[in-house]
Amino acid sequence: EAQVTQNPRYLITVTGKKLTVTCSQNMNHEYMSWYRQDPGLGLRQIYYSMNVEVTDKGDVPEGYKVSRKEKRNFPLILESPSPNQTSLYFCASSLRYRGGNQPQHFGDGTRLSIL
Amino acid sequence: GENVEQHPSTLSVQEGDSAVIKCTYSDSASNYFPWYKQELGKGPQLIIDIRSNVGEKKDQRIAVTLNKTAKHFSLHITETQPEDSAVYFCAASQGNTPLVFGKGTRLSVIA
C-alpha cells in the first residue's frame, strides 16, 4: 500500500530536549515536505526537499532542521524545542514533474506538545 | 510570493444541499490548483485538482471551477452527505514551486 508513515504519532516532551520526527514514503517520490498545522493558520511549510541531499526552507523554518540522506526518508529535527513549536505536523511526498505540480500524499500527522 | 485566501472559514449545510468554497490567489503564474479534504485525526487527502488549461473539472458530486482572469477557483459539492463533513483546503502553485495552502474551511453537514 502506498503510504507516508510518520513516527511518533503523539509526543509530549519538555523544552530543550532534542527530538526527531521520522517520515518515510514507499512510493519512490522525489519531493518531500514538512508542514505544521495550527488553528486558524492552515498548513504552513517548514522545509522541503526536491531530491536526495537537496533541501530548502519553507515559510516557517526557524527552530527546525531536516536531512535527506535517502530518497525514502525525511526526518524533522527539533534541536532545542520550545513551547511555540507545539503543533500538529505533517509530512508529505509527491513526484516531481517539470512544468506542473503533482498531488501530494500526506502522512497522518504527529501531534507534538512542548511543555 | 503566492498568497491564497479561502472563504468561508466555516460552513454548515443541510444534508442534500450544495456547498461552495471559494479561493483567490495572487500570483498570475500559478497553474496548479488542488483541493484537499482532511478528516478528523487524518492527514489531508487530495480530492480533486485542476490545471490552468482547464476551466472546470468534475468527479461525481465534486466539481472545481477556475477563473484565471479573476484569479479565483471554487469547490462545489452537490447532494452533501454527513461523510462530507471535514476540513477542506485549497492550494496553488506554479511549476516546481511548493504549494501554498489556504487556511481551510470546516464543513459541517447536518443530517
Image (cartoon, rainbow, N blue to C red):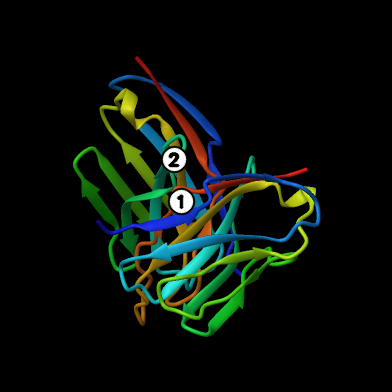
Amino acid carrying mark 2 in the image: Ile
Q: Residue lying furthest bottom in this view?
A: A53
Q: Residue lying furthest top in this view?
A: B111
Instruction: Please state the chain letter of the residue tagged with numbered disc 1 in the rendered image.
Output: B
Name the residue rendered at 24%, 56% in the picture. A1
Name the residue rendered at 53%, 31% in the picture. B10
In terms of image quadrants, where is residue A59? bottom right
Instruction: Check residue B21 in the rendering and tell me which mark sits there, or answer none.
Output: 2
Quadrant location, the N terminus of chain B: bottom right
Is residue A39 visible in the rendered structure shown here? yes
Q: Earlier in the sequence, mark 1 or mark 2?
A: 2
* Location of residue B27 in the rendering, given as x and y in whole percent from the top left corner: 54, 68
* Location of residue A8 in the rendering, given as x and y in whole percent from the top left corner: 53, 50
Amino acid carrying mark 1 in the image: Cys
Is residue A42 visible in the rendered structure shown here? no
Name the residue rendered at 39%, 51% in the picture. B35
Instruction: Please state the chain letter of the residue tagged with numbered disc 2 in the rendered image.
Output: B
Q: Nearer the viewer, mark 1 or mark 2?
A: 1
Q: Tag 1's secondary structure? A: strand
User: What residue is shown with label 1?
Assistant: B90
